[in-house]
């Protein structure tokens, strides 16, 4: 008797910091895609970001705290350990080599989807993995950058509106906002870590 392919999700990001919308996306992916495993992949050297990221050790620690209560989640450190720029296609290829026959699902938010065609070898990513976008179809154009890309198959994840931005959170924290004043935006353990380590405070 043949068994169904193992359904493995990949959810990458800078997670600087990981916030409540990230956790909601992960939970939606686990439940709606019926994943056997969801790999949370903190970005190493982000080729697409002009600003320097917070130190990898801090981001990894916050990711572990943010997703600790979710089932079937694996924190994947490979991009933090990779030398040079970090690309999704390399992570996807490595995962497929490690788990041959698995069915990969690439989970992303609406901002990542809008920039998808700027990713390295995005056509190969779309061919090798099911693209899953955590934003309602009525909230965004169903093609990134309004380009006609009929070959892309997208699975939409149902998610309530959560206008949370890591950029806005960093700016607020740099302005002196106590992280514990953001209970709806930051998981409590992450807020505690930020406070304990004085992250994002204005220099």
Image (cartoon, rainbow, N blue to C red):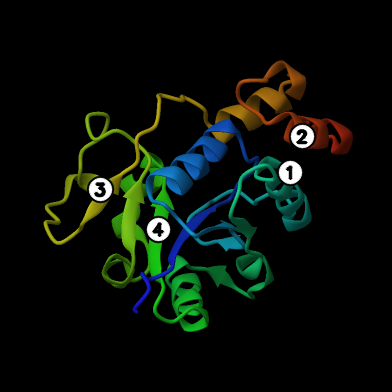
- Return the residue nearer the eye: 10 or 120: 10
Q: Which residue is mark 4?
A: 106
> How far is mark 2 from mark 1, CA to CA?
6 Å
Closer mark to the observer between disc 1 and disc 3 = 1
Asked whether the residues under the numbered discs 1 and 3 touch, taking CB atoms below 8 Å apart as contact, a structural biologist would say: no
Q: Choose the circle earlier in sequence order: 4 or 2.
A: 4
> How far is mark 1 from mark 3, CA to CA?
32 Å
Q: How many marks?
A: 4
Within the image, what quadrant is residue 17 found in?
Answer: top right
Farthest residue toward the top?
A: 181
Q: Count neighbours of disc 3 (C-alpha within 10 A) and say few if under 14, some if 14 to 19, many if 20 or more.
A: some
Q: Choose the circle earlier in sequence order: 3 or 4.
A: 4
Q: Which residue is mark 1?
A: 65
Q: Quadrant of the N terminus?
A: bottom left
Q: Residue at x 65, y 58 (%)?
A: 75
On screen, 163 above or below 18? above
Q: Count neighbours of disc 4 (C-alpha within 10 A) and say few if under 14, some if 14 to 19, many if 20 or more.
A: many
Disc 2, SS: helix
Asked whether the residues under the numbered discs 2 and 1 touch, taking CB atoms below 8 Å apart as contact, a structural biologist would say: yes
Q: Residue at x 73, y 45 (%)?
A: 62
Q: Position of residue 170 (x, y in %)?
A: 65, 32
> How far is mark 1 from mark 4, CA to CA?
22 Å
Q: Which residue is mark 3?
A: 144
Q: Position of residue 196 (x, y in %)?
A: 88, 34
> How far is mark 3 from mark 4, CA to CA?
15 Å
Disc 3, SS: helix
Q: Position of residue 117 (x, y in %)?
A: 29, 58
Disc 4, SS: strand
């Amino acid at each position: 008797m043949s068994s169904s392919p193992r359904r493995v999700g990949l959810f990458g990001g800078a997670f600087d910091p990981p916030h409540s919308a990230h956790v909601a996306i992960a939970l939606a992916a686990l439940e709606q895609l019926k994943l056997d495993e969801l790999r949370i992949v903190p970005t190493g050297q982000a080729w697409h970001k002009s600003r320097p990221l917070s130190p990898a050790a801090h981001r990894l620690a916050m990711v572990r705290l943010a997703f600790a209560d979710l089932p079937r989640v694996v924190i994947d450190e490979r991009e933090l350990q990779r030398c040079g720029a970090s690309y999704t296609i390399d992570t996807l290829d490595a995962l497929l080599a490690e788990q041959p026959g698995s069915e990969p699902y690439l989970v992303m938010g609406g901002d990542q989807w809008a920039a998808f065609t700027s990713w390295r070898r995005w056509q190969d990513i779309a061919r090798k993995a099911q693209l899953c976008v955590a934003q309602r179809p009525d909230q965004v154009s169903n093609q990134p950058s309004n380009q006609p890309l009929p070959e892309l198959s997208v699975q939409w994840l149902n998610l309530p509106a959560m206008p949370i931005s890591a950029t806005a959170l960093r700016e607020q924290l740099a302005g002196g906002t106590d992280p514990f004043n953001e209970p709806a935006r930051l998981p409590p353990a992450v807020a505690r870590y930020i406070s304990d380590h004085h992250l994002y405070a204005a220099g």
